[in-house]
Amino acid sequence: MIRTIHLWVSMALALVLHAQSPTIRGYQYWFDQFDQNDANAFFEAVAPATTVNLNNVPLNTESLSIGSHNVHLRLKDQASDGTVRWSSVVTRTFKKFHTGPWEIVAVRYWVGTPINEFDPLVRTKVFDTPEQQFELEDGPLDLCGYPTGNQTLKLQLKDNHGQWSSIVSRSVNVTSAGTLGLPTIAASAPNGFCPGTVVTFTATPPSGPNIALPGAYTWTVPTGPGWNHVPSTGNTIMVTIGSAGGTVEVFSTNHCGTSSTASLQVVIPTTPQQPSEITGPIQACAGETVEYAVTEVPGVTYDWDITGGWPDEGGPGNTITTTIGNTDAMITVTPTNACGVDGPERTANITVSSPPDAGEDASLVLCTNAPPYLLLNALNGTPDLNGSWTGPFGPDTGIFIPGSSPEGEYTYTVVGNGACDDAIATVTVNVMDLVLDGITGPSTVDEPGTVLFTATPTLVDADSIVWSIPDGWSWADNDLDPYDAEAYLDSPDEAVIDTICAKAYGGGCIGDTECLVTELTVGVSQVNNEGGRYSVYPNPNNGHFIITIGGTPTNGALVVVDALGQRVHHQPLAIGNRTLQLDLDHLASGVYHIRIRSGSDMLNIPVMIQR
């Protein structure tokens, strides 16, 4: 069995010196033939004491050889007056062993009765790497050439201090060995065979019937510059790759024969060639996202670089994606092989054009009575000023005139330059339709009651209809929404000529006012003008009217109201007058109503001023 060895020696000593006062100051020891006066004697001081126990004190045996030795010890006593006394010398025998760790470096074995350890029956297997334990099942032994059948196999293990263990016997069944097959070689080189890297080559024997187990391997590695290896007879070998390629060879052996030689060609990656021309837009438009590429070469990675601070996402592949910056730039791609060796770079100069800006799409809502609108002001962003407009019916000025220009989509185009495409933005225009055709309702009301007036037509763009009603009129109780197109109104109980008006609101816009003149004849008789008692001429004209009165002239009053029912002119009727001058030159063009009241009679005559 393998023995345990300790460097430090434990002393089982019981040297005790008694004194009246603590005067023991230390102890001295030396080995073998040396004496206390020799330079190899050691002194160890202790705290002053009356008793010192030297049991298991450590001794410095570093200079001693492996084997048996003698140690001599004595105690030192020093009185207060300086007098030194030594005890008698005690001698003990001890043995120095090897230091650890203990590892197995070889196994020797045999079948039968060898004459001595040099007998050919004795075979030795040396391990490339020291082992902590040896399992026969994990490391088959070469029994080729031994007698077949049931045999007694004897083994010994050798430690790393050159000592052999006791003999261990095992019963085994020895069968006829086959032939050694051609091994295969594999290499642990994930990045390829790069100069200076350490690669482990492994030989694997074939398996199957009539295939013998190898007992050892013989390796041959290249010997050129930079090549090196750790000698090995096992199935693995560690090799430092040199600067040029070569061939690693191996064959297996046992006590019965030798296999054929297997080989593995070690190819050093060459320096990459310059990449192909860079493909991608050499004339580019700022802000675009583009891809650049070179032809991919197996085993080569690529490092990309772009000047000008452009963002890039690419490498180690053969493509890169970038967003074109605002300034010209240069793209550089450098090829690198698996060993980190760079090849010549490839560059390309990129010329950058600034893209046109047509702004951003927008929607525009205009009122029918709004002034002409510059569509460029509707676009979002900061559009360039040198673009052109296209409307629903072709080229357009870009000035939208409500009531004249068609609604729809207007396109603004700014022509691009260089590699930049045209920029396009659209404005979708909607005109709020708040135009009322008029108001329907009775033109004459003979008796007080609820009267319905309707603003027409129904306007989809209108949020509300706002009604204007004269004094004396009021909202009827059955009108639940005074802001819709129907107005239920309670009329006054007196004779009067009034004007009911409506106006549409929607989208922040206000439509024009439409009015209806309603005559209330409650309690008065209506003058019939069909006989020509009152005549107004010329009608229409520019504001100067002549009124003639037939029959017996009477006194009364003349009032002129506008389309909203507001009084804009008033003058009396004198008794005996048959002709009356009516000057409305101060009024704007439009339709007005002349209201004449004479006694209990009332007459309404529409007139028009045209200029």
Image (tube, rainbow, N blue to C red):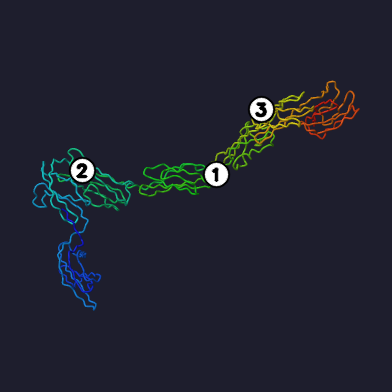
User: What number of labels is visible?
Assistant: 3
Furthest toward the right, the residue is: 576
Looking at the picture, does residue 298 appear above or below residue 81? Answer: above
Mark identifier at residue 353: 1
Whole-percent x, y for residue 392 in the image: 62, 31
Q: Look at label 1 and name its amino acid.
A: Ser
Whole-percent x, y for residue 407 in the image: 64, 32
Crowd around label 1: few <14 · some 14–19 · many ≥20 (10 Å): many
Q: Is residue 592 left or right of residue 321?
A: right
- Precedes in sequence: disc 2 or disc 3: 2
Quick one: SS at disc 2? loop
Whole-percent x, y for residue 513 in the image: 72, 32
Quadrant of the rendering where the C terminus is positioned = top right
Name the image quarter holding residue 424.
top right
Mark identifier at residue 260: 2
Depth order, front residue of 351/291? 291
Q: Is residue 391 left or right of residue 250?
A: right
Quick one: SS at disc 1? strand
Crowd around label 3: few <14 · some 14–19 · many ≥20 (10 Å): some
User: Which residue is denoted by mark 3 in the rendering?
Assistant: 458
Discs 1/3, front: 3
Looking at the picture, does residue 507 appear above or below residue 277? Answer: above
Residues tagged 1 and 3 counted as in contact (Cβ below 8 A): no
